[in-house]
Amino acid sequence: MKTKKTIHRLIIAVAIILTPAIAKADTPFTIKGDSHTKLGEYSITETESTNNSQKYILKYEDALHPIEITVTEKRRCTEYTVRSNIMEIQYKCEKDGFGATLLSDSSANLPKEINEMFLCHEQLGYQKRITTQQIELNEALGLIACYYPFLLKNIDNLYAGN
């Protein structure tokens, strides 16, 4: 248990110290970094924006499929809904910190049984509070890219190297 907490603290430190590079100019908003998992490097690119939400695509260099992240600003928090073809989860940034939680049944696209097959509840417990303060969008997206793979019972379900 201490080893897993140490790994999580190390990931936070790396994500904060090595703030992901953000592309400028006329290119879409992009964040790149190392996931510190077998999925390798990641890139997050904005795909569309509306008045109340922004959509991003998260791609890992060694993953089978991209992952969609929808960012929605609420009155008291920012919600990051993360959806892959096998699992969906939500990260929230509130005044007391940033962490993972289950999606409400009304917000879920996947059947609960599918999500349960792939979600590691122990890791979800560890990720309930990743930071104890509010964080900016690019830091939140970088943390999601680094932490999301640990929520899978078996990371090989995303890994393309099989």
Image: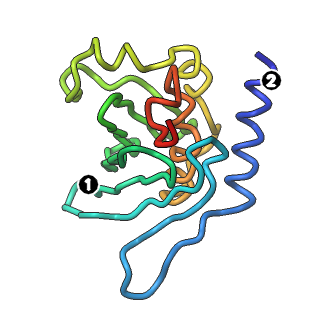
Farthest residue to the front: give it.
Answer: 162
Mark toward the start of the polypeptide (2 vs 1): 2
Residue 111, image x, y percentages:
22, 18
Quarter of the rendering containing residue 56: bottom left
Tag 1: amino acid: Ser
* Label disc, if present, on residue 3 of the rendered structure: 2
* Residue for badge 1: 53
- Tally of marks: 2
Q: Is residue 47 above or below residue 103?
A: below
> Disc 2 versus disc 1: distance between alpha carbons?
36 Å
Q: Residue at x 80, y 23 (%)?
A: 3
Q: Nearer the viewer, mark 2 or mark 1?
A: 2
Q: Residue at x 74, y 52 (%)?
A: 14
Quarter of the rendering containing residue 41: bottom right
Q: Nearer the viewer, residue 158 or 57?
A: 158
Q: Residues within 10 Å of mark 1 (few under 14, many from 20)?
A: some
Q: Is residue 153 above or below residue 113?
A: below
Mark 1: which secondary structure? strand
Q: If the image is split into quadrants, where does the N terminus sit?
A: top right
Q: Is residue 76 above or below residue 124?
A: below
Q: Residue at x 39, y 33 (%)?
A: 90
Q: Is residue 30 above or below residue 140?
A: below
Q: Residues within 10 Å of mark 2 (few under 14, many from 20)?
A: few
Residue 151, image x, y percentages:
51, 27
Residue 72, image x, y percentages:
30, 48
Q: Residue at x 33, y 37 (%)?
A: 84
Q: Nearer the viewer, residue 62 or 141?
A: 62
Tag 2: amino acid: Thr
Q: Quick check: 16 left or right of 46?
A: right
Residue 47, image x, y percentages:
28, 64
Farthest residue to the bottom: give it.
Answer: 25
Quarter of the rendering containing residue 97: top right
